[in-house]
Image (cartoon, rainbow, N blue to C red):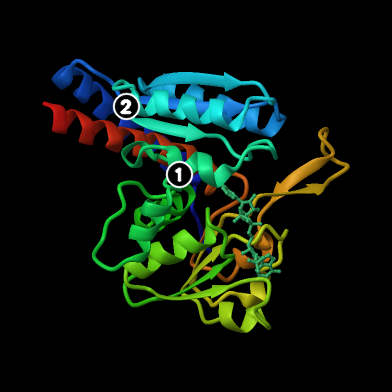
Amino acid sequence: MATVIDGKAVAQTIRSEIAEEVRALSQKYGKVPGLAVVIVGSRKDSQSYVGMKRKACAELGIKSFDIDLPEQVSESDLISQVHQLNANPDVHGILVQLPLPKHINEEKVLSEISLDKDVDGFHPLNIGKLAMKDRDPLFLPCTPKACMELLSRSGVSIKGKRAVVVGRSNIVGLPVSLLLLKADATVTIVHSRTPQPESIIREADIVIAAAGQPMMIKGSWIKPGAAVIDVGTNAVDDPTKKSGYRLVGDVDFEEASKVAGWITPVPGGVGPMTVTMLLHNTLEGAKRCFEKNH
Ligand code: NDP
């Protein structure tokens, strides 16, 4: 049976480490890290993610700057908000909650965020540096960073190992592949046009599943002893639940946990780590800023 990686517990440990560093910064510089969380409109899922992020800031002593804009806000007004936050010395990280309403060009808005405040790590320059040898981005995107942290804190070795990433999105699949490559894994990316993904996944010492396809990866696709990080978060109908649904990953946990060496559950695996990595990025941004201006 696989070791189940408890993302909640790892996240809690990292949060305590962050809180400790925030206290130390406050003593040394008389300042704390600041994170601006910008939300446009009132989508329920976005409101809930933003609420979680703001609450986590408060718990760790990070100052949160709450920018709530109406659904109809114009692209130029949103960009001018971003510019104000870029110029605010108390803000060390800027997060614009996605998706934005259709009349706003996401790419344009994200590329206006100052590079040294890009705590989501989505700025094309940060992603570009991630893709280049011997270059280090200022920030790593949160979910990919969460996957790497779960692997390293579980003692999974990466160097020289065969890693297969399922999915090639800008926010998960592609950047996590680049991170694994930087960590000296031999990386293959499987996507929706890949024939017979199971034959490729079966060769993997490390599987990162980020396809958004409920339980598509079966136990028989997993190499015995492999480390399986399941990013997928899919709601499936479940009449036995009060809500009428439950969350499952991209991996059939029941089957795969009998074969894998390590596996993350859904929920309780990568999910709790993602917000924690955002807070960690904010801390890093603040530290760089305090050190530079000291
Ligand atoms: P996207 O929909 O943007 O990308 C999905 C990727 O999976 C695409 O590259 C697609 O290929 C590929 N794909 C789709 N179907 C298959 C298939 N049958 N076989 C192989 N590859 C396939 O999703 P995201 O990357 O944004 O998210 C992926 C999952 O991770 C979702 O379930 C999402 O909810 C979850 N997630 C969880 C987070 C967390 O913190 N826990 C954070 C972010 C996402 P193609 O490019 O060819 O279309």
Asked if the residue at tag 1 contacts the one at tag 2, i.e. Cβ–Cβ closer than 8 Å, the answer is no
| Residue most extreme to the right | 239
> Considering only vertical position in the picture, is 203 above or below 48?
below
Residue in view at x 28 percent, y 38 percent: 284
> What SS does tag 1 mark?
helix
Ligand 1's quadrant: bottom right
Q: Is residue 67 left or right of residue 157?
A: right
* Image position, residue 116 (x, y; %): 31, 39
| Residue most extreme to the top | 30
Can you tell which mark lies on residue 183? none
73 and 201: which one is in front? 73
Residue wearing tag 2: 19
Q: Is the C-beta of the residue carrying label 1 under 8 Å from the nearest atom of ligand 1?
A: no
Q: Is the C-beta of the residue carrying label 2 under 8 Å from the nearest atom of ligand 1?
A: no
Real-space CA distance between mark 2 and mark 1, rounded to the nearest whole angstrom:
30 Å
* Image position, residue 293 (x, y; %): 14, 27
Residue neighbourhood size for the residue with mark 2, other residues' Cα within 10 Å, grouped as few (<14), some (14–19), many (≥20): some
Residue neighbourhood size for the residue with mark 1, other residues' Cα within 10 Å, grouped as few (<14), some (14–19), many (≥20): some
191 and 113: which one is in front? 113
Q: Is residue 26 left or right of residue 268?
A: left
Residue in view at x 31 percent, y 53 percent: 137
Task: Give residue 71's quadrant in the image.
Answer: top right
Question: Which three-letter amino acid code belongs to the residue tagged 1?
Answer: Ser
Residue wearing tag 1: 111
